[in-house]
Image (cartoon, rainbow, N blue to C red):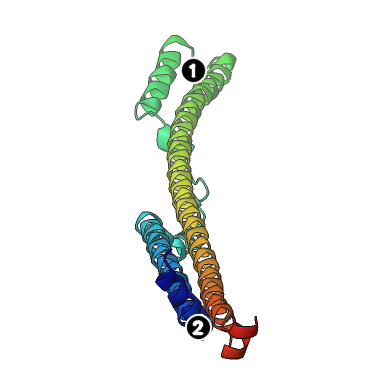
Amino acid sequence: MDFTSAINDLTGDLFGSNQDNRIKRANEAAEKAYNNAQKMSDANRELFNQYYSKAQDLYGDQSSKVGDRISALENMEAYDPGQFSYTGDVNDFYSKAANQRINDAMGLIREQSDMFSSDYLNALTAKQTAMASEEWDKAYERYMQDRNQQLQEFSTNANLGQQAYNNKYNKNKDLLGVSQNAQDNLMNAYGSNISNLANQNNTDAQNYANWQQQVAANENSRKGLFGRVFG
């Protein structure tokens, strides 16, 4: 450094021009740092918003159906197949030829027996009773077969109806679970977004405070003329 430069620096230090320049540069550097931090803050906020928007795209539609799917379950009426009812009667199942067969048998007894014999009426009565009982047994068997068939059909239809009800209930329950899970995911995403934004707000406030404190500290470092001369 030559003598002229040394004199200029000494004069600048004495009257504060060099110090003013240093403070100005320090303030500019502090402001630049703050502006860079704000750019990063803006980028972070954009990422937070993109994250929440993506969550809304993924879960918003399903989440909005929670109320409808709760109502669908609540409004399902319990399946009731009713009571089995059978209206048949044994008499409905007597063979149309039963009376003819009984009459034919009675006729055969008459032809083969002596009407004046003491055994005639007994044989006639016994045969008629036996055949009537046999025809009744056959009618009753057909009656029970028909009843059991209708009972089986009723049970089959009742089971099918119950299965259809169970399938519908399980489907509604599963859909509600999907919506509730989507709602939970969306609320978690919303909570994360709010938390991230709050933290970023705190960081921004702290960065601003740091900038202002740095500027204040730089300004407080100025020395008056008396202080510059006498140190």
Element under disc 2: loop
Q: Amino acid at mark 1?
A: Met
Residue depth check, mark 2 versus mark 1: number of the one nearer the observer: 2
Between the residue at mark 2 and the residue at mark 1, the CA separation in whole angstroms equals 161 Å
Q: Which residue is mark 1?
A: 115
> Is residue 44 visible to us here?
yes
Residue 108 image position (x, y, % from top left): 41, 14
For residue 221, above or below residue 47 = below
Residue 48 image position (x, y, % from top left): 43, 61
| Image quadrant in which the N terminus is located | bottom left
The residue nearer to you, when weighing 201 against 207, is 207
Q: Which residue is mark 2?
A: 16
Q: Amino acid at mark 2?
A: Gly
| Image quadrant in which the C terminus is located | bottom right
Element under disc 1: loop
Residue 66 image position (x, y, % from top left): 46, 62
Q: Residues within 10 Å of mark 1 (few under 14, many from 20)?
A: few
For residue 172, above or below residue 213 = above
Question: Residue 63 shows which numbered tag?
Answer: none
Q: Residues within 10 Å of mark 2 (few under 14, many from 20)?
A: some
- Asked which quadrant contains residue 25, the reply is bottom left
Residue 198 image position (x, y, % from top left): 53, 70
- Asked which quadrant contains residue 226, the reply is bottom right
> Is residue 27 visible to us here?
no
- Asked which quadrant contains residue 106, the reply is top left
For residue 136, above or below residue 26 = above
Q: Residue at the spot x=44%, y=44% of the render?
A: 167
